[in-house]
Image (cartoon, helix red, strand yellow):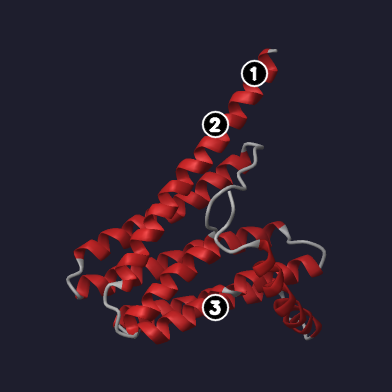
Amino acid sequence: MAKIFQVSARAGMTRVVEPIARTLLRVGVTPNAVTVTGTLGVLVGSIALGARGYLVAGALVVTFFALTDLLDGTMARMRGGSSRFGAFLDSSMDRVSDGAVFGAVAYWLATQNDHVGVAAALICLVSGGLVSYVKARAEGLGMTCNVGIAERTERLLIVGVGGLLTGLGLDWALTTALWLLAAVSVFTVGQRMTHVYRQAQRAELGVDA
């Protein structure tokens, strides 16, 4: 299934990121350092800004630092590939960032008595983690799971746009974005589980044959 952001858009972003990645590597910055820095930036944007109601500033900070996901990956490729620890660190920090974003959003919505929005944020928090877990578990069992209508960067951008629009006066935008994201995430979990099930069935039939 096609991604929300097409390959051409990603290629354009890569052309912007690559010069930055080369410069950072040249001055001795490691991909792991960028990963940790990006996570800290997301934490600041989520907890210090978003959770306190500074939605515009929080959305801009979180979106900016979330894009370091492209930067550290590009730097790792330029160095010849990510190390095992680098891949582990990146995945772990992604979970920390996601928890901070949706936890902060849920907290702020609770202070606004938006229980519908809180429910959507919690669904996003759980289902987003499950999207990543299903893929990791499948790959750990020797199968592939590169399917889904929205990857992590797109998911953060959706909630970021919702927060930005709400901060600019569209009160319904964040809750709407969260429910859209919840639906996308739940669908992706089902999509990935179906994809893995079919692979497992084919493998069993091959063995039996």
Nearest the eye: 175 or 65: 175
Q: Position of residue 127 (x, y in %)?
A: 41, 52
Q: Residue at x 56, y 46 (%)?
A: 135
Closer to the observer: label 2 or label 3?
Answer: 2
Q: CA distance from mark 2 to mark 1?
A: 12 Å
In the picture provided, is 19 more to the left or to the right than 53?
A: right
Query: Dot 1 corresponds to which residue?
Result: 205
Q: Nearer the viewer, residue 150 or 201?
A: 150
Above or below, 101 relative to 58: above
Task: Tell me the kind of residue under disc 2.
Answer: Tyr
Q: Which residue is mark 2?
A: 197
From what the image shows, is residue 129 above or below residue 18? above
- The picture quadrant where one finds residue 206 is top right
Asked if the residues shown at circle 2 and circle 3 are in contact, with their CB atoms under 8 angstroms apart, the answer is no
SS at mark 3? helix
The residue sitting at the left extreme is 113
Disc with the residue nearer the chain's start (2 vs 1):
2
Instruction: Check disc 1 and report its element: helix, strand or loop.
Output: helix
Q: Which mark is residue 65?
A: 3
Task: Look at label 1 and name its amino acid.
Answer: Leu
Q: Position of residue 101 (x, y in %)?
A: 41, 70
Does residue 145 show up? yes
Instruction: Answer whether labels 2 and 1 touch (C-beta < 8 Å).
Output: no
Which x, y percent locates residue 180?
38, 60
Q: Which residue sits at x=40%, y=77%? A: 46
- Which label lies toward us, 3 or 1? 1
Answer with left or right where residue 136 lies relative to residue 123. right
In the depicted structure, whether residue 136 falls above or below residue 171? above
